[in-house]
């Protein structure tokens, strides 16, 4: 014998308060800006780290995102 089971969801999503979300959004934005700097501008006169180590590490990402490098 089979019994028909019906699931009745009782949990509803609750909205996230902006006060809790804002620090994570700012943190993510700063990380993205830092990544864009290292991929797009970390070479030559604007280089913060001497040598070509960072440039070679992000070289393929630079081409993927359309930044000229050579």
Image (spheres, helix red, strand yellow):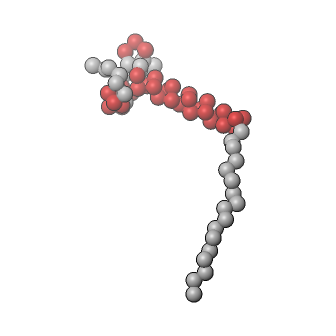
- For the point 70% across and 35% down, the residue is 18
Judged from this view, the residue extending furthest toward the top is: 45
Left or right of 15 in this view: 31: left
Left or right of 5 in this view: 57: left
The percent position of residue 6, horizontal first and vertical second, equals: 63, 70
Q: Quadrant of residue 59?
A: top left
Closest to the observer, 63 or 49? 63
- For the point 27% across and 19% down, the residue is 70
The percent position of residue 10, horizontal first and vertical second, equals: 70, 60
User: Is residue 50 among the parts visible in the rendering?
Assistant: no
Closest to the observer, 17 or 59? 17
Q: Pick the quarter of the image with the N terminus.
A: bottom right
- For the point 45% across and 25% down, the residue is 36
Closest to the observer, 57 or 16? 16
The percent position of residue 14, horizontal first and vertical second, equals: 70, 47
User: Is residue 57 among the parts visible in the rendering?
Assistant: yes
| Location of residue 47 with respect to 64 vertically, above or below | above
The percent position of residue 20, horizontal first and vertical second, equals: 70, 38
Left or right of 46 in this view: 5: right
């Amino acid at each position: 014998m089979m019994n028909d089971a019906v699931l009745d969801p009782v949990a509803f999503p609750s909205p996230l308060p902006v006060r809790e979300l804002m620090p994570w959004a700012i943190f993510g934005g700063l990380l993205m800006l830092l990544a864009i700097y290292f991929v797009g501008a970390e070479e030559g006169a604007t280089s913060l780290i001497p040598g070509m180590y960072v440039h070679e590490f992000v070289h393929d990402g630079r081409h993927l995102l359309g930044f000229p490098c050579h």
